[in-house]
Image: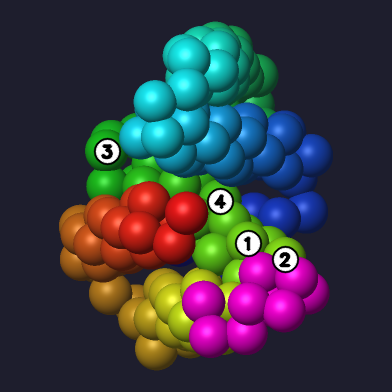
């Protein structure tokens, strides 16, 4: 059973789970950037990313079984997790980091990030809404690698 983006985003626990994944992505990227520039604060950021992942996994395993997410977690695998929780967080990170770069007058990197975020949004929820979960998951993994590459390259 497929759920629309409106059904998924109207659930508060879903927003919390996706927000925890976004926070983990942000702090993992900040940690990798700091470690790349030989600053030990990167270890603190990586510890925060690990904390957010642990909280995400704890909340994911303790969802009420009667809710819409409880039904999804009962049959969740890697591909559905990538599609339902990682992809919206990645889209959010692309767009927010792109808007921040655009606001700080880094127009070219900002537009590239916004472009990638909007194309992933269009691929997953408009063009590929009927695609199988593994295709959406693989596409999300590819965009995740692109995001890490863009963020590490434009320090």
* Secondary structure state at the residue bearing disc 2: helix
Name which of mark 1 and mark 3 comes first in the sequence. Answer: 3
Badge 3 density bin: few <14, some 14–19, many ≥20, Cα 10 Å: few
Residue plotted at (27% across, 38% down): 78
How far apart marks 2 and 4 lie (CA) works out to: 16 Å
In-front residue for pair 118/111: 111
Residue plotted at (64% across, 54% down): 8
Mark 1 or mark 3: which is in front? 1
* Secondary structure state at the residue bearing disc 4: helix
Which residues fall within the magenta stretch?
A: 101-109
Q: Are marks 2 and 1 in contact (CB under 8 Å)?
A: yes
How far apart marks 1 and 3 lie (CA) works out to: 26 Å
Give me the disc on residue 97.
1
**Residue 102 shown in magenta:** yes
Q: How many marks?
A: 4
Q: Is residue 144 left or right of residue 108?
A: left
- Is residue 133 something that shows in the picture? no
| Percent x, y of residue 152 | 38, 51
Give me the disc on residue 78.
3
Name which of mark 2 and mark 4 comes first in the sequence. Answer: 4
Residue plotted at (24% across, 62% down): 142
Badge 4 density bin: few <14, some 14–19, many ≥20, Cα 10 Å: many
How far apart marks 3 and 2 lie (CA) works out to: 31 Å
Give the residue pinned by disc 2.
100
How far apart marks 2 and 1 lie (CA) works out to: 5 Å
- As displayed, is residue 59 above or below residue 125? above
Give the residue pinned by disc 4.
89
Give me the disc on residue 106.
none
């Amino acid at each position: 059973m497929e759920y629309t983006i409106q059904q998924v985003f109207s659930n508060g626990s879903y927003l919390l789970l996706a927000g925890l994944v976004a926070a983990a992505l942000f702090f993992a990227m900040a940690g990798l950037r700091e470690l790349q520039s030989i600053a030990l604060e990167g270890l603190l950021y990586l510890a925060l990313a690990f904390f957010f992942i642990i909280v995400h996994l704890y909340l994911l395993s303790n969802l009420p079984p009667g809710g819409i997410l409880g039904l999804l977690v009962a049959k969740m695998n890697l591909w559905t997790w990538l599609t339902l929780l990682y992809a919206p967080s990645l889209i959010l990170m692309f767009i927010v980091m792109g808007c921040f770069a655009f606001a700080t007058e880094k127009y070219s990197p900002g537009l590239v990030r916004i472009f990638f975020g909007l194309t992933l949004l269009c691929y997953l929820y408009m063009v590929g809404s009927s695609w199988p979960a593994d295709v959406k998951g693989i596409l999300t993994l590819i965009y995740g690698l692109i995001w890490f590459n863009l963020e590490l390259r434009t320090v």
